[in-house]
Image (spheres, rainbow, N blue to C red):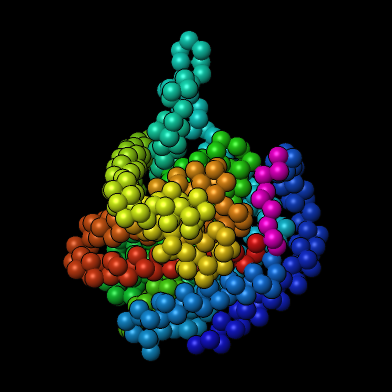
Amino acid sequence: MFKPLVFIFAFLAMANGLIAQGDSAATAVVADTVQQATELIQPLAKKDFKIESEGMGLASVLRGVIGIIALVMIAFLFSTNRRGINWRLVSIGVLLQATIGILVLKVSFFQYGLEVVSLGFTRVLGFTQSGVDFLFSSMDTGTMMPALKSFAFVILPTVIFFSALTSLLFFLGILQKIVFGMAWFMKRTMGLSGPESLAAAGNIFLGQTEAPLLVKPYIGGMTRSELMCLMSGGMATVAGGVLGAYVRFLGGGDPALEIYYAKHLITASVLSAPAAIVVAKILVPDKGQVQTELSIPKEKIGANFLEAISNGTGDGLKLAVNVGAMLLVFTAMVTMVNFMLQNLLGEWTGLNTEILALTGGRYQGLNLQFMLGYVGAPIAWLIGVPVEDMVSVGQLVGQKTVLNEFYAYVELAQMKGAGAFVHEKSVIMVTYILCGFSNFASIGIQIGGIGSLAPARRGQLSELGFRAMLAGTLACLMTAAVAGMYY
């Protein structure tokens, strides 16, 4: 069982010494491309947008490998068929994660490429602002009034725009070609079935209810393991629309920081696809024959491109309103629960004073943030988060699981702005951890969304719901452990 993981550790140790050679070779071959990328990124470098890292060393690699082994063991304990686990697939999936991570985060050529993609992503993101300015700017001054510069009027429109853009790309067939290419690669390298390869690749770009549309004809005949893989992929990734919103408020309006977080969020989405497959195949291994066909249905989401944009806009509006409503309700609920815990129970028992002294003023008393932080702290430490920040990261992991990732990202932006983290490595790792839909509410969303495509499978969807959430959570943690090796 541990032989593949030992091989992975050896690979990472050797890779650390070979990066410099790979960098020079890649740069020599593609000098023109690198030069163009440098010209694009150079204006950003002057703003010092890169967060300094401690660098890839033996200690960080070892911490990451220990974290990966621990997460694999947790999945192993909850497996429905431990003897049926395909350890070759597991080792290839983890090695694929490590390879992608080391290429895009440490090899200069791929770093330039990812930064150029991130630059393009944020440029497209900036187009949303022209629509926001048109709707909400004063007709007298031509600028937005300070009262309107809020989450609802600045961040949520991004969700609507990216939903419409995704629909247009889907209608034009561009998205399907990208998804098919990635699915073919995963099918060949990991030995997956055709439908689960498509679903895993689709989840990188689409939401947990949109990606299943790519495999709609196959859902009825999926094995239990394939169905688990479909659900886990949705739990471990986020939709393109909300990804844009995360970039906006994590960047805090700074273009350089937006590019920086876009780079890490895009990387997290890609890395989480093989991670979700690995964990899903441990939790519910294949037993019988799987579907090998790899083809995307020819369904269109509109009669023409205008209808596709219109449909995407409508879906994006529903999503934005839903996100805003959830944040309103969850924030109010957390405030109410914290009042009962801190102002009533904490004051009555004297726990507030004890907690204040114990945490050195980080927490003012007994509240949800304190409780979730200390419950999640061991998990955060296990995957390589520095000791000084493990409680803060644990708090965000708990909020993501109990509430949702959007709420947790908003909290992360506030904590980051308040200087709550000692190590920037912790901010990077938690950015990866939160990049997934794995929370309790998503279980119901998947049962309803996927169940509507294959009503006969609702029973199995319900049975697999909690395991899929566990798989998504472990996959996001595994992705963070891989990223943490390089910082």
For the image shown, how many numbered marks are present on the structure? 0
Q: Position of residue 391 (x, y in %)?
A: 49, 59
Give the side of residue 203 with respect to residue 212, left or right: right
In the picture, which quadrant includes the C terminus? bottom right
What residue lies at 65% left-to-right and 64% top-to-bottom?
Answer: 486
- The stretch drawn in magenta includes residue 53: yes
Q: Position of residue 306 (x, y in %)?
A: 38, 35
Residue 10's place in the image compared with 107, above or below, is below
Q: Position of residue 83 (x, y in %)?
A: 38, 89
Give the side of residue 307 with respect to residue 184, left or right: left
What residue lies at 80% left-to-right and 62% top-to-bottom?
Answer: 24
Residue range in magenta is 47-55
Give the side of residue 298 with respect to residue 359, left or right: left
Q: Is residue 285 in view?
A: no
Residue 342's place in the image compared with 192, above or below, is above
Residue 387 sits in which quadrant? bottom right
- Nearer to us in this view, 323 or 302: 323
Q: Position of residue 207 (x, y in %)?
A: 38, 53
Q: Main secondary structure of the magenta part?
A: loop
- Nearer to us in this view, 253 or 86: 253
Residue 327's place in the image compared with 145, above or below, is below
Residue 151 sits in which quadrant? top left
- The stretch drawn in magenta includes residue 371: no
What residue lies at 28% left-to-right and 48% top-to-bottom?
Answer: 344
Residue 17's place in the image compared with 121, above or below, is below
What residue lies at 61% left-to-right and 47% top-to-bottom?
Answer: 260
- Nearer to us in this view, 317 or 351: 351
Q: Is residue 346 in view?
A: yes
